[in-house]
Image (cartoon, coloured by chain):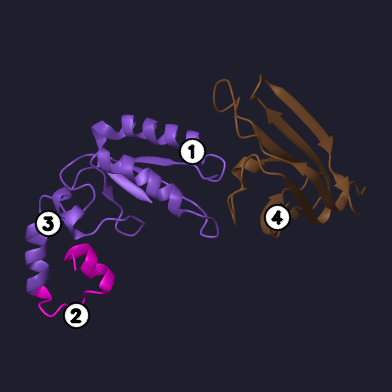
Chain colours: A brown, B purple
Amino acid sequence: MIAGSMTWAIPGGRVPERSTGPEPESTSYDMVCLLNIGDEDANVSMWAYYEHREPVGPYLLTVGARRVRHVRINDLIDPEAVPLETEYGLVIRSDVPVVVQFWRQDTERGKAVATAAAIPLD
Amino acid sequence: MEYAMPIEAGPECFLEVRKRVMEHHRRTVGWRVLYRYVASDDAYLSTAHGRDTVTISLHQNNTLPYDAYFNDMEEIFLRYGGRPHWGKKHSLSAEELEPLYPKWAEFRRIRRKLDPEGVFLTDYMSRLLEGR
C-alpha cells in the first residue's frame, strides 16, 4: 500500500521565542512529524522559506521504513538554525511517500498546542 | 567561540552566559551552548594549564551574523578569567593573553630561540604571540 505524498508544504511556521515552565519539556517549539509506513527508508529534504530572503536548505534527514520521526524545528542547525519568532514556511520532499504533520507548542502564556496536517503538493 | 575558565567559576559563568543568551540572542542564535570539563595539564599555552577547567562553547552558522553575539559574550568569559580557544574566534592579542598564562614568558623565550627569524610567524600569529 502506498500512503502519503512525496512533496509537502507547511506555510505557517513561526517558532515562539518565549517559554514559561520547566525546561526542556515546557520550551516552546515548532515540530514536523513524519510517518513512513512503507518498506523503504525515506530520504527527506526540507527547505525553509522566509519573508525577506531566499530559501535555506536542504535540511536532510531519514525516516526509517515503518517508522515515525518527530523533528523539532528548534533543533535544525545545518545548514542554518531557524530564527525564532520569524515567519517561515517549509517545503518537504521525500523519495518515497510519507505523511507529514505540523505541531507547535507555545508556552509563553501557559501551555498551548496547535497541530495541522501539512499540505500535500503532489 | 570557546573560553576555558577555572572549574570553580564554571557554574556561575554558565548561568550568566545563559541569562545573556536568553535576554539578547535567543531569537537569532539557534545553537546550543556546550559545557565540558578538562583536566589540568602543564603545557605552557594549554587553556587548561595549571587548573582544572570548564569550557563553554558558543556557535553560530557562518552564513548568519555572529560578531554581535560573540563580542557581547566574550566580556563575560574574560571576567571569569577565561582563556580563549586558540583555534576559534576571539579578540585578544599578546598583551591580553600574557597575563592568562604563567609560562608565557618561558614559551616566548623558547619560541624565539627556535625561530629567531620569525619564519613560522604569520601576521596573525605575530599578533597573538608577539603583540605586533
Distance of label 1 from label 4 (alpha carbons): 22 Å
Residue ID at (78%, 38%):
A102
User: What residue sits right under mark 3 in the picture?
Assistant: B104
Left or right: where A4 falls relative to A12: right
Left or right: where B72 falls relative to A8: left
Q: What span is in magenta?
A: B114-132
Distance of label 3 from label 2 (alpha carbons): 20 Å
In the image, residue A35 sits, relative to residue A55, either above or below, namely above
Chain for mark 2? B
Mark toward the viewer: 1 or 2: 1
Instruction: Indicate the position of residue B90 as horizontal and vertical percent values.
Output: 33, 55
> Which amino acid type corresponds to the residue marked 4 in the rendered image?
His
> Which amino acid type corresponds to the residue marked 2 in the rendered image?
Val
Q: Are marks 4 and 3 on the same chain?
A: no
Question: Callout 2: helix, strand or loop?
Answer: loop
Residue ID at (26%, 74%):
B122
Mark toward the viewer: 4 or 2: 4
Question: Callout 4: helix, strand or loop?
Answer: loop
User: What residue sits right under mark 4 in the picture?
Assistant: A52
> Which amino acid type corresponds to the residue marked 1 in the rendered image?
His
> Which amino acid type corresponds to the residue marked 3 in the rendered image?
Trp
Q: Could you say which is closer to the camera, residue A40 or residue A85? A: A85
Distance of label 1 from label 2 (alpha carbons): 43 Å
Distance of label 4 from label 2 (alpha carbons): 48 Å
Left or right: where B81 falls relative to B74: left
Instruction: Say which label, 1 or 2, has the lower sequence index.
Output: 1
Distance of label 4 from label 3 (alpha carbons): 49 Å
Q: Are marks 3 and 1 on the same chain?
A: yes
Q: Are marks 4 and 2 on the same chain?
A: no
Instruction: Say which label, 3 or 1, has the lower sequence index.
Output: 1
Tag shown at residue B24? 1
Q: Could you say which is closer to the camera, residue B97 or residue A97? A: B97
